[in-house]
Each structure stands twice: as C-alpha cells, then as structure tokens.
Image (cartoon, helix red, strand yellow):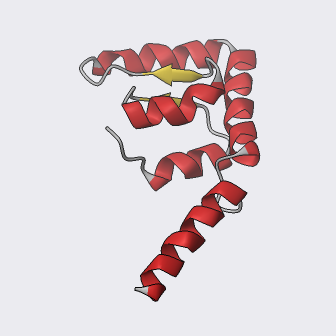
Amino acid sequence: GLALSNKLFMYLTTGLALLATPTPAQRSLLAELQGHVAWLDPEAPGQVGPLLRRWDADRPRLDAARRASWEAAVRRWHWEHAHESGRFLAAFARLTRD
C-alpha cells in the first residue's frame, strides 16, 4: 500500500482518466485530482463496467478527469519537478559518496 507504480505517473502524463484502488499511496498522490478519479474496491470487480459506462455517457465528466490528470502531471508529478529531481540527485550523491 505505500509504493506507487511508475505506470501511474505515465497515466497522468498521458492525460488518462484514472480508475484506481484506494491504497494509501494512491490516495495521497491522487488527492489533488479532486474527485476526478474513479475509486475501485478491489473486492468488487463488477464495478469497473458501470464506472466506464458513466464516463462514456458523460463526456464532459470524462474530459474533466483527463484534464485533471494532465494538469497534475504538469504541475507536480513529473521527473523534472524540482522536488523529484532533487530527491533523485541527492540519493545518487549519497550512493556515490559512500
């Protein structure tokens, strides 16, 4: 529940509407999408179809979810963001120093 898949970041940068399971890590990352994520109960696989049909029937809602993903990627969730590149470079510096 604490780790995030790289795929999630790729989905954001491609502007996909997201269906996600409410793990702590995903909830933390996707909180800024403010209601534009369809949360899935992993114990109830039958809910995927109705969620997708809802987006199919409500294109403005689908477009808003896509836009929220893209905007989150542009604003924060990309490798060039100062917070992320700084973490990576600091970790690399520690490894090469030791």
**Which of the 4 quarters of the picture holds residue 83?**
bottom right
Quadrant, the C terminus: bottom left
Residue situated in front as seen by the camera: 63 or 83: 83
Q: Picture quarter containing residue 29? A: top right
x 61%, y 58%: residue: 84
**Residue 41 coordinates in the image, percent (x, y):** 33, 19
User: Splitting the image into 4 quarters, where does residue 60 fall?
Assistant: top right
Q: Is residue 70 left or right of residue 2?
A: right
Residue 97 drawn at (x, y percent): 47, 86
Residue 90 vertical position relative to residue 29 in the rendered view, above or below = below
Q: How many marks?
A: 0
Which residue corresponds to the image point at 61% horizontal and 17% vertical from the top-left?
35
- Using the image as rendered, state which of residue 48 and residue 74 is in the foreground: 74
Residue toward you, 51 or 65: 65
Camera-side residue of 55 and 1: 1
Task: Give percent across and percent down for residue 78.
Answer: 66, 55
Q: Residue at x 73, y 23 (%)?
A: 64
Q: Is residue 53 above or below residue 74?
A: above
Task: Decide if residue 21 is on the left or right side of residue 65.
Answer: left
State the quadrant of the N terminus: top left
Whether 76 is drawn above or below 35: the answer is below
Residue drawn 75% across and 47% down? 74
Q: In the image as oriented, which residue stretches furthest toward the left?
A: 43
Left or right: residue 97 versus residue 86 is left
